[in-house]
Amino acid sequence: MPRRPGLSARLKLTLSYAGFLLIAGALLLGVVWVFLLRYVPDNSRGLLGIAPNRYLLVRMFAPAAAVAMACLLVFGLLGGWMLAGRMLAPLTRIRDAARLAETGSLSHRIRMKGRQDEFRELSDAFDAMLEQVESHVAEQQRFAANASHELRTPLAISRALLDVARDDPTRDRGEIIERLHTANTRAIDLTEALLLLGRGDRGDFTREIVDLSLVAEEAAETLLPLAERRRITLDVTGVAARTSGSAELLLRMAANLVQNAIVHNHPADGSVTVHTGAYGDGSVLRVENTGCPLPPELLPTLTEPFRRGAERIRTGEHAGVGLGLAIVHSIVRAHDGTLELVPRPAGGLVATVRLPRTR
């Protein structure tokens, strides 16, 4: 936004220092006048005719006072200019870093040295902000690249199938239509997942009282046919656990956790347990499933977009779009909660969601 030119902070501080010195000097002269000159007799007669009087002292004191005030003014301006420049030097570094960030250079850090003060706190806060912005921008760029790649695949398949249908009239149209339906369904699912992930990241939803136990029961009931086909035992236990948030988003969060637990339950004949309860001032939703052991280095990547487990990629069953746990993580953050993923010693995963409880 354009602004009219004004005085710099350094000049304002300089004038403030000089003005303070002048005021202090004037007060000092006033004190001298009140407590010294007022007691000098105002007559010219005295011992041998040379006794001091107020008139003579004022004539002698006024020029010296004017010179002192002028020296104070010069000293205040010069000293104030140097002191202000020294004091504002950290702000200059912060300003330069902000201008670098404005040009797109987010890797620069101020890293101001010295003892802790207001400027160092501002510098550290600015460095932390730059680090978060850089991480967020990198994540968004990586997410956009992955999303483009994932969307390109079903669209390319659809185009190839349409080319086959156009160039080979003898090809089975039913098979082509079925494969087109599958590719389009995957593209639609991916688009809906991206929209849901963006909605969770923005946090633009109406909050209401939600019981996680009812949400867990509804998610389990919806996914029960999938569990039965895979011969997975699905149990829901626990008590009422109320929180504040979007019922739709929290239902999607629970459904994604349960579906992830069912799909990654290898081999078959495993179990998935969904438990709700309260802890301290919060509510908890825990989904535990049996399965293959998970390497520790895989856990931090499970909530990243377009990350899929090795078993799901290998079998191709319920491959999804790779956004299940990323959506869960986004919804949990939007509800001021935490998501914890812990591998079971015997294999499988325990996903624990903690949300603030509503009294």
Image (cartoon, helix red, strand yellow):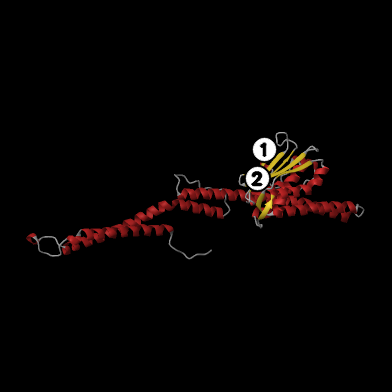
In the picture provided, is 18 more to the left or to the right than 230? left
Q: Which of marks 2 and 1 is in front?
A: 2
Amino acid type at circle 2 is: Ala
Which is more N-terminal, label 1 or label 2?
2
Which residue bears the numbered disc 2? 278
The answer to whether one can see residue 160 in this image is: no
Measured along the vertical axis of the image, is residue 7 above or below residue 301?
below
Marks 2 and 1 close (CB-CB < 8 Å): no
Q: In this view, does 161 lie above or below 279?
A: below
Whole-number angstrom distance, CA of label 2 to CA of label 1: 30 Å
Place of residue 271 in the rendered image (x, y in percent of width and height, measured from the top left): 77, 39
Classify residue 274 as left or right of residue 27.
right
Q: Position of residue 169 (x, y in %)?
A: 91, 55
For residue 353, which quarter of the picture? top right
SS of the residue at dot 1?
helix
Disc 1: which residue: 297
Tell me the kind of residue under disc 1: Glu
Q: Which of 37 and 90 is in front in this view?
A: 37
Left or right: 247 as drawn, with respect to 78: right
